[in-house]
Image: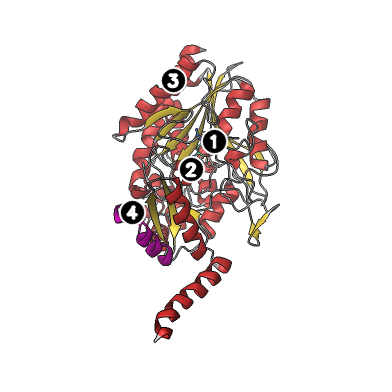
Amino acid sequence: MKIPTVLPFLCALLFCIAASESCSIDPSYKGKSVVRLTFEDDDQKELVLSSLSELCEIKYVQDEHTNPKDNFVELIVTLEQLLKADRMMPRKSVRVLVGDLGAAINHERESYIASPVESGSAGDEVCNSDKCSAGTVTAGQVDLEYYKKYHTYEDFLERWNTLTKTYSDYVSLETIGSTHEGRDIHMFRLGSTSAEKPVRILMNAMQHAREWITPMSVLFTVESLAAQAYKAKAWMYDLEILIVPITNPDGYVHTHTTDRMWRKNRNSRDSCQGEASGVDLNRNWGTDFAGGESTSSDPCSDIFTGPEAFSELETQALKKLFEEIEGIKAHIDVHSFSQLVLGRWSYSDKTPPNVEEVDAVGNLLNDKLSSGGKTYSYARGKTDLIYLASGVMPDWVTDAHGVLSYTYELRPKSMWEGGFMLPAKDIIPTAEEFHVSIEALIEHVLKKH
Ligand code: 0X9
Ligand code: ZN
């Protein structure tokens, strides 16, 4: 009689040993769920997480966004892990945010990414049918069709080039570096070439590959400013806007081809389970590098710092910009998600220089971002809204160059509303509120300098 009772236990044990040795979550995420676990205390957290890791690797989707007040983590889990968490914790503490992540990714691919027909042939004279309308650029207008879906890297390249042709007097596209896999890193330069010492603002999007809304939003601003300049040239005379739409092109391509949840670059210097480990570019900057706030020296971690500050070609390319281009008065590092504006410092609670201006502009930008009807929040240092982080870009920008610098976290507010997979219908409103905030930043900078 003992056999039937012991057998399931033995099987479970064997499964557990086998799983802990070999189970890693495959990048198709088929049948995997995204779950939020809210813990009563750190002891419970440790117990539950170590039990789940016996079944399969623990894959955090957004540990970094853990609200320091509410002790929770968001994980991608197998069904077995989900059931185990459910057994170990009160029901209300286990919240399934995405039932089938693999299915959600497939849905996004099928419905939210423009096909080459929709986005191709931008500006081509032959392209005068409805099929091509998403790729058309008409001088003086922002083409909203293009912003109804997400785009592949190749589509972006085509679009960027068309924009520079349409607005050749005030928009150019430069190569500021190249990546580990040999892709160019591009930068738009918008504004007048006539001013001797223009005031400059620099923005870069997508240090993190999975944050797809970010290049869409900054591109919308490029198009909006270019259209505005076409209609009323005067406003750009003393101003130059520099925009790096995709800081991490290798990572972005990887999110389309292989792993939608990929965050880092694709450096293969170190490996993780036989694959390129990549480096978290927003932990690779020189201020408080590897300082221990949300960093890891484990190549498999999403917050892997790399071997030393500026070890990566992408961070080197942007660093060089700050060293070579004079007159940069403000900088925005564009991320998603959480609807936040984050001022300095990221790595510590210390008061930043010019704290009044940092807070006043941070609040202003935050109000403008909230103009589209969604609530954004402004914070700096460690608050209920955000953890500290070492080696991040805006800290270095302020620290090394004294430039006013913010992190944006665009829509949505939570994983519940899509997380990195913001529904395509929200691209335009997000891009519009982003643009409104950039106009306010331009006004501030022009008034001051
Ligand atoms: O962790 C990051 O690099 C940024 N968040 S994200 O989810 N897009 O990865 C935030 C960086 C700034 N962090 C703080 N001010 N704490
Ligand atoms: Zn990010």
The percent coordinates of residue 69 (x first, y second) are 39, 37
In reply to whether residue 1 is colored magenta, the answer given is: no
Q: Secondary structure at mark 2?
A: helix
What amino acid is at disc 1?
Ala
The percent coordinates of residue 221 (x first, y second) are 44, 34
What residue is shown with label 1? 389
What residue is shown with label 4? 95
What amino acid is at disc 2?
Glu
Q: 432 or 2, which lies in front?
A: 2
Graded by Cα atoms within 10 Å as few (under 14), some (14 to 19) or many (20 or more), the crowding at tag 2 reads some
**CB under 8 Å between discs 2 and 4:** no
Q: 197 or 106, which lies in front?
A: 106
**Is the distance from the Cβ of mark 1 to the nearest ligand 1 atom less than 8 Å?**
yes
Q: CA distance from mark 1 to mark 3?
A: 19 Å
Q: Which mark is residue 359?
A: 3
Of mark 1 and mark 3, the one earlier in the sequence is: 3
Quarter of the image that includes the N terminus: bottom left
Of mark 2 and mark 4, the one earlier in the sequence is: 2
Q: CA distance from mark 3 to mark 2?
A: 23 Å
Of mark 1 and mark 4, the one earlier in the sequence is: 4
**CB under 8 Å between discs 1 and 2:** yes
Magenta stretch bounds:
79-100
What amino acid is at disc 4?
Arg
